[in-house]
Image (cartoon, helix red, strand yellow):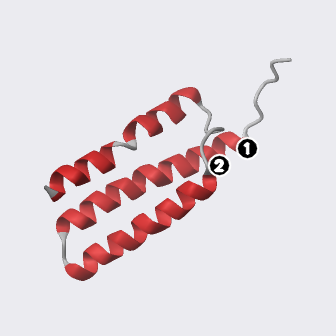
Amino acid sequence: MGAVAAVCTTSAFVPQVIRVARLKSAEDISLATFLVFSAGMAVWTVYGFLIGSIPVILANTVTLILALTIVVLKLSYDRTPRPSTA
């Protein structure tokens, strides 16, 4: 049950990473949300190490990587000037 939940919640971020990378825009992404979420995933990963749970470590590490990828892309794309459409 836990493994299925981990796969579902972790894989939910893959389409978002693909979309942001494909569009080269993260304008609609909340940086604050993803920073807080990433901090939570980091804490969950540490917790996994403390309790010695490989599934908790793996699921949260992968989710953390995906969330941080979105953060990095957001910071990168937000700094890149976009051509005006006017």
**Quadrant of residue 18 within the rendered picture:** top left
Image disc number at residue 75: 2
Secondary structure of the residue carrying tag 1 is: helix
Residue 61: image location, x then y, percent:
33, 61
**How many marks overall?**
2
Residue 38: image location, x then y, percent:
48, 61
Image disc number at residue 11: none
Up/down of 72 relative to 53, above or below = above
Residue at mark 1: 79
* Residue at 54% from the left image edge and 55% from the top image edge: 34
Q: Amino acid at mark 2?
A: Leu
Residue 3: image location, x then y, percent:
16, 55
Q: Amino acid at mark 1?
A: Arg
Query: Viewed as shown, does residue 22 lie left or right of 57?
Result: right
Secondary structure of the residue carrying tag 2 is: helix
Q: Quadrant of the N terminus?
A: bottom left
User: Farthest residue toward the top?
Assistant: 86
* Residue at 61% from the left image edge and 45% from the top image edge: 74
* Residue at 26% from the left image edge and 77% from the top image edge: 49
Could you give the CA–CA distance between mark 1 and mark 2, rounded to whole angstroms?
6 Å
User: Farthest residue toward the left?
Assistant: 1
Marks 2 and 1: in contact by CB < 8 Å? yes
Q: Quadrant of the C terminus?
A: top right
